[in-house]
Image: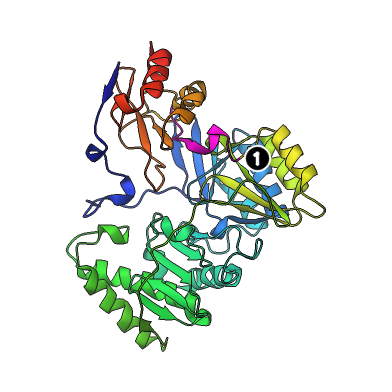
């Protein structure tokens, strides 16, 4: 059965406000595993999505030795290992620690930082944000207060092109044309050298606002205090830290994800449904020249040593998407069955079966096994939500998506 509903009836989890947080933050990490139907799950935070080849090989080895062999990309450029066996936590922690992926056990769940994936590669950004990324991660791991952040709190470092600035992060630093950096919350301009420290100060201001409020909040959008109260707290704390700042309008222009194919001296690929098989991961590490960058759009940017044609052909042959017109770039999904007990359907299999329908609708599709819509990305899209009765419900009138409705009817009949 296929029912319709208006997009107004559905709100992204990232848009929720004044949420009730009357329990502890159970967001999984590398050391706090989550029990799923397909085994334990570990979420490995990778600030900026950046991995050395050695670290990538260590993650691949952990997936093969301890999990289901695959690496699952998240909408924050992190990696999840699934199908982990009972009692593997210590071995996994040792593997990650030896690869430099656990710089601070107390902070490993709060190292949520997205950064412009092509920064310093294609020449389009106003600055290379890699120094910001390294500095902010170090600041986070050195801050006792930062341990109070939830595993959902997000930082974004944008090189001025506006790609990650549109992802709804809690704290965003965006390079400005005058050489400075814009910071939100607070709507202030700071010097580029102060930008990483200012980002941490803004996060600590959020924690102060939470402590002063009557409700718990894990994200800034959940705060019940007025925006100007948080802004004043940010300004005061910046002043206390000796960080010069001034009020400034915050840019609102955004750009899309990195293009696919050859980009400067790198190649950019999309990963269908965010799942990388052991072979695909091995191909990526084999062609990489020292580093991989995982993107918040479930893609990978890989610097290559000599020409891009060979690596692109090799990665395409492994099933990674290099064609920007591929319908896979318009389709996402949660894990669904059999990995999640709450899911009403194997949404990934159904999304694959209905792939051709993605080209017949005007917006990207996101398939969810239940109303929670885990992993739902930012941006306007059509939600395809599995129902307990065995069908799907659309967040758009099927009269405007008739081809999609027909495909759904076919796979659920």
Residue that protrudes farthest toward the right in the picture: 306
Q: Quadrant of residue 366?
A: top left
Q: Nearer the viewer, residue 152 or 1?
A: 1
Left or right, residue 289 beside residue 347: right
Where residue 299 appears, x then y in whole percent?
A: 58, 46
Residue bearing the label numbered 1: 322
Please tell me how crowded label 1 is: few (under 14), some (14-19), or many (20+) other residues with Cα within 10 Å. Answer: many
Question: Up-down: is 283 above or below 143?
Answer: above
Q: Nearer the viewer, residue 272 or 71?
A: 272
Where residue 167 appears, x then y in whole percent?
A: 42, 55
Q: Residue at x 65, y 55 (%)?
A: 51
Q: Residue at x 62, y 46 (%)?
A: 260
Instruction: Give the residues drawn in magenta, as a range.
Output: 324-336
Residue that protrudes farthest toward the left in the picture: 214
Question: Up-down: is 10 above or below 244?
Answer: above
Where residue 161 appears, x then y in whole percent?
A: 51, 63
Q: Quadrant of residue 238?
A: bottom left
Residue that protrudes farthest toward the top in the picture: 413
Q: Is residue 33 visible?
A: yes
Q: Residue at x 65, y 40 (%)?
A: 322
Left or right, residue 171 beside residue 269: left
Q: Nearer the viewer, residue 54 or 309?
A: 309
Element marked by disc 1: loop
Q: Say if the magenta span includes residue 326.
A: yes
Where residue 57 appears, x then y in whole percent?
A: 71, 47
Q: Say if the magenta span includes residue 167.
A: no
Quadrant including the C terminus: top left
Quadrant including the N terminus: top left
Q: Nearer the viewer, residue 147 or 125?
A: 125
Q: Count every numbered label the image shows and give the total.
A: 1
Q: Is residue 83 visible?
A: no
Question: Up-down: is 138 above or below 82?
Answer: below
């Amino acid at each position: 059965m296929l029912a319709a509903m208006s997009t107004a009836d559905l709100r992204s989890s990232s848009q929720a406000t004044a949420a009730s947080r009357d329990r502890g933050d159970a967001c999984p990490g590398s050391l706090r595993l989550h029990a799923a139907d397909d085994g334990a799950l570990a979420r490995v935070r990778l600030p900026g999505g950046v991995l050395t080849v050695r670290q990538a090989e260590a993650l691949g080895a952990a997936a093969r030795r301890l999990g289901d062999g695959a690496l699952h990309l998240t909408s924050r450029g992190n990696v999840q290992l699934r199908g982990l066996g009972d009692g593997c936590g210590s071995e996994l922690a040792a593997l990650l620690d030896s690869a430099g992926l656990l710089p601070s056990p107390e902070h490993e769940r709060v190292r949520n930082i997205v950064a412009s994936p092509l920064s310093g590669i294609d020449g389009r950004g106003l600055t290379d944000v890699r120094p910001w990324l390294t500095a902010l991660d170090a600041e986070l791991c050195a801050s006792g207060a930062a341990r109070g952040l939830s595993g959902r709190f997000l930082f974004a470092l944008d090189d001025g092109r506006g790609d990650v600035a549109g992802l709804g992060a809690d704290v965003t630093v965006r390079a400005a044309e005058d050489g400075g950096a814009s910071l939100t919350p607070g709507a202030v301009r700071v010097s580029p050298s102060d930008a990483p420290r200012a980002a941490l100060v803004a996060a600590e201001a959020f924690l102060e606002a939470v402590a002063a409020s009557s409700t718990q909040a894990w994200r800034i959008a959940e705060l019940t205090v007025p925006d100007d109260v948080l802004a004043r707290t940010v300004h005061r704390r910046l002043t206390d830290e000796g960080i010069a700042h001034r009020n400034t309008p915050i840019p609102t222009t955004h750009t899309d994800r990195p293009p696919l194919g050859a980009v400067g001296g790198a190649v950019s690929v999309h990963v269908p449904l965010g799942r990388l098989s052991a072979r695909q991961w091995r191909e990526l590490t084999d062609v990489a020249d020292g580093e991989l960058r995982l993107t918040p759009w479930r893609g990978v940017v890989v610097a290559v040593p000599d020409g891009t044609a060979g690596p692109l052909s090799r990665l395409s042959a492994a099933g990674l998407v290099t064609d920007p017109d591929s319908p896979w770039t318009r389709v996402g999904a949660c894990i669904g069955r059999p990995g999640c007990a709450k899911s009403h359907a194997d949404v990934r299999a159904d999304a694959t079966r209905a792939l051709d329908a993605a080209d017949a609708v005007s917006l990207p599709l996101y398939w969810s096994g239940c109303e929670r819509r885990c992993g739902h990305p930012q941006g306007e899209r059509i939600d395809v939500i599995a129902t307990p009765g065995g069908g799907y419900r659309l967040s758009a009138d099927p009269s405007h998506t008739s081809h999609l409705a027909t495909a759904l009817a076919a796979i659920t009949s």
